[in-house]
């Protein structure tokens, strides 16, 4: 058996069977003009489907207008967006792969002066009126970037936005939906006691703080059945979230065990990576612990994928040992449209990243520069 062969066996995920155990992570690439996907995005996803991605999670896709730090992030709240997403989905399918839409609400890390937030005509919303520390927006001057949000009066309204986004994703032909519950965004904010100080049914106890994420998953399941997934980052840090270790373990053990009872297709566990940790007042923000060891035992139904700086070689060992069902790779998919084919054929992942053009909007270059122009291996 070759050292990476455990990655190349089929796996049933929800109602589909994927051809290998290497998923493509959601990667914000900042190419949607005025929140609408386009043909260059379809080409990008199609290249990676052709390159062997078993299942692709779309870049974070906003469920409503929000002043995100990513000014060219896509949405999925109107018909024009749905029509363009359908082109992306069709291209992925034509190239032999599957794609889930990652549904995203940034919560308190939006900005009231961002163009889309102004168009929305609503405040920056969060579980509680607590600003995240730090933050620097790419298109809005000033530090810190984050502002004090308005506490959400009725979270059911946001739950309904997620349901409509799932309905729209279904119309666009996505194979499933993945809830972005990681990295200090809205679902994470509800879970985290440092960001959620509510005293109603949405805050306080672990059960109440977990309620929002679970209710969102339930309405997504109403639309997609067993083809619903969840991404979490229990180690925290990014966007100023993170609880003491025991509270973290208790919170995520409860949340993930309850989520698993809903019959999810898969869960992505994002492990601690130092480069995404932040420091405030001389102290690191993350709660460092082994997320796979800590939470893998709670899953009885969902497939489990490990994400964050996982190499194919390490991932193959993890899968072979039964510690996870597969792996999720992010950054290397940006620079290698044929990543899986390279791994399978022993070719190096040696394309040089075009750092300047990882995101668009920094200069007048075409959308394709640093996006669809990486070479495949000969």
Image (cartoon, grey):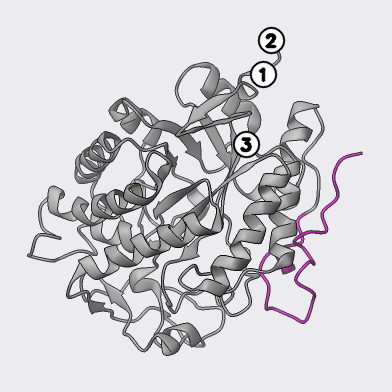
Work out whether residue 278 can be spotted.
no
Q: Position of residue 230 (x, y in %)?
A: 39, 46
Work out whether residue 358 can be spotted.
yes
| Magenta stretch holds residue 100 | no
Q: Is residue 78 above or below residue 197?
A: below
Determine contact: label 2, label 1, CB under 8 Å: yes
Magenta residues, start to end: 353-378
Mark 1 vs mark 3, foreground winner is: 3
Looking at marks 2 and 3 on the same chain, the residue that comes earlier in the sequence is marked by: 2
* Residue at which label 2 appears: 1
Q: As drawn, is 245 to the left or to the right of 104?
A: left
Quarter of the image where the C terminus is located = top right
**Residue found at x 53% / y 22%:** 319
Q: Which mark is residue 5?
A: 1
Q: Which mark is residue 84?
A: none
Displayed quadrant of residue 228? top left
Disc 2 residue crowd, few under 14, some 14–19, many 20+, Cα 10 Å:
few
* Residue at which label 3 appears: 54
The residue furthest top is 1
Q: As drawn, is 342 to the left or to the right of 165?
A: right
Which element type, helix, strand or loop, lies under badge 1? helix
Distance from Cα at disc 1 to Cα at disc 3: 15 Å
Q: As drawn, is 212 to the left or to the right of 352?
A: left
| Magenta stretch holds residue 355 | yes
Distance from Cα at disc 2 to Cα at disc 1: 6 Å
Q: Is residue 140 above or below residue 69?
A: below
């Amino acid at each position: 058996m070759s050292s990476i062969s455990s990655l190349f066996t089929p796996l049933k995920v929800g109602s589909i069977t994927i051809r290998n155990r290497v998923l493509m992570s959601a990667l914000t690439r900042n190419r949607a003009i005025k929140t609408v996907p386009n043909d260059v995005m379809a080409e990008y996803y199609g290249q990676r489907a052709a390159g062997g991605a078993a299942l692709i999670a779309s870049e974070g896709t906003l469920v409503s207008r929000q002043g995100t730090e990513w000014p060219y992030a896509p949405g999925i709240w109107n018909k024009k967006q749905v029509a363009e997403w359908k082109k992306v989905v069709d291209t992925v399918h034509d190239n032999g792969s599957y794609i889930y839409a990652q549904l995203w609400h940034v919560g308190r890390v939006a900005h009231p002066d961002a163009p889309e937030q102004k168009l929305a005509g609503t405040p920056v919303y969060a579980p509680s009126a607590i600003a995240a520390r730090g933050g620097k927006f790419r298109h809005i001057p000033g530090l810190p970037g984050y502002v004090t949000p308005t506490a959400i009066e009725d979270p059911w309204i946001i739950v309904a936005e997620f349901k409509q986004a799932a309905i729209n994703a279904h119309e666009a032909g996505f194979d499933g939906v993945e809830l972005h519950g990681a990295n200090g965004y809205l679902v994470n904010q509800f879970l985290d006691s440092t960001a959620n100080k509510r005293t109603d049914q949405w805050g306080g106890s672990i059960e109440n703080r977990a309620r929002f994420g679970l209710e969102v998953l339930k309405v997504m399941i109403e639309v997609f059945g067993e083809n619903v997934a969840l991404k979490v980052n229990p180690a925290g840090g990014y966007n100023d979230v993170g609880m003491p270790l025991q509270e973290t373990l208790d919170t995520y053990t409860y949340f993930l065990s309850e989520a698993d009872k809903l019959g999810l297709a898969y869960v992505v566990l994002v492990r601690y990576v130092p480069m995404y940790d932040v420091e405030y007042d001389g102290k690191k923000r993350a709660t460092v612990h082994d997320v796979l060891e800590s939470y893998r035992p709670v899953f009885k139904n969902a497939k489990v994928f490990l994400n964050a700086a996982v190499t194919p070689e390490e991932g193959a060992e993890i899968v072979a040992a039964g510690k996870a069902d597969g792996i999720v790779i992010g950054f290397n998919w940006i620079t290698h449209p044929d990543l899986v084919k390279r791994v399978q054929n022993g070719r190096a992942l040696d394309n040089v990243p075009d750092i300047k053009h990882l995101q668009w909007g920094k200069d007048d270059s075409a959308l394709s520069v640093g996006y669809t122009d990486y070479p495949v291996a000969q």
